[in-house]
Image (spheres, grey):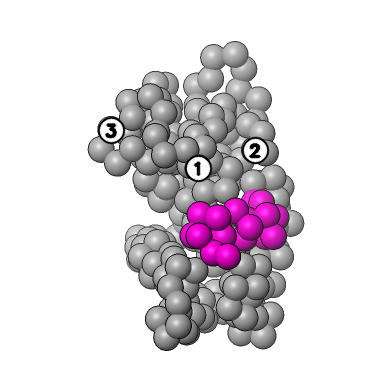
Amino acid sequence: MEKAMDAGRQSEVTCVDFWCNEFGMRVRIALRELGVPFEYIEEDLRVRERSELVRRMNPVHRSIPILIHHGRPVCGSVNIVEYIDEVWGQEARLLTGDPADRADARFWADFIDHKVFSSQTRFFTSKGEEKEAAKEELAEHLKRLEEVLGDKCFFSGDNFGFLDVVFIPFSSMFYGYEQHGGINLEVECPKLKRWEKRCRERESVSEVLPDGKVQYELHKKFYGIE
């Protein structure tokens, strides 16, 4: 169960999320990485109806995560991570480098959201030939990200940064990839697996990411996998 950093009685910063939400993990990791105290409010995604708080703070999409700062909501996981970085990243920025480097990081963040997540969903929910096609596509996307990582410790170089925050929550499904369809990342993407290990050694990550087996079992229920 997620535990918030101590933010006192009246929290300046609140994160509304569900513990196994890969998109919300980004927000909680970014807050911890930059040492931002926050209150955590659990929104159980297993319940069909969204809470009054979510409906009020994100009336357009009624989705989480939501960051509430001084009573004002910020929505969209990547958008929130950038907001956190701009507000609290004075000493150590997550999104570093020149404008071209930052644009490149944003490009790959979009790739993760629209390519990796889409393939992951189809991999877990489809059957037969469609499942095999989704499996191959997912594996190719992961290999492409491994190429972007290269021999660096982290995606931005020697320091844990923006793209690491965006992608590391998906590593909580690596166990599921192997159990569900035999995608062995130790063989397919060894550099990515070593990167995962380095990330998980960080307190900001280890305190947020769930156990892979627990994550897979819960997603089996979400996806209706027997």
**Mark 3 or 1, which is nearer the eye?**
1
Q: Are marks 2 and 1 in contact (CB under 8 Å)?
A: no
- Reading the image, the residue beneath label 2 is 2
Sequence-first disc among 3 and 1: 1
Examine the residues drawn in magenta and state their main secondary structure.
Answer: helix
Mark 3 falls on what kind of element?
A: loop
Q: Which residues are magenta?
A: 209-226
- Callout 1: few (<14), some (14-19), or many (20+) C-alpha neighbours within 10 Å? few
Foreground: 74 or 156?
Answer: 74
At horizontal 50% and vertical 42% (from top left) the residue drawn is: 46
- Can residue 132 be spotted in the picture? yes
Mark 2 falls on what kind of element?
A: loop
Q: Which mark is residue 59?
A: 3
- Callout 3: few (<14), some (14-19), or many (20+) C-alpha neighbours within 10 Å? few
Q: Disc 2 and disc 3: Cα gap in Å?
A: 25 Å
Check disc 2 and give the amino acid type: Glu
Tell me the quarter of the picture where residue 182 sits. bottom right
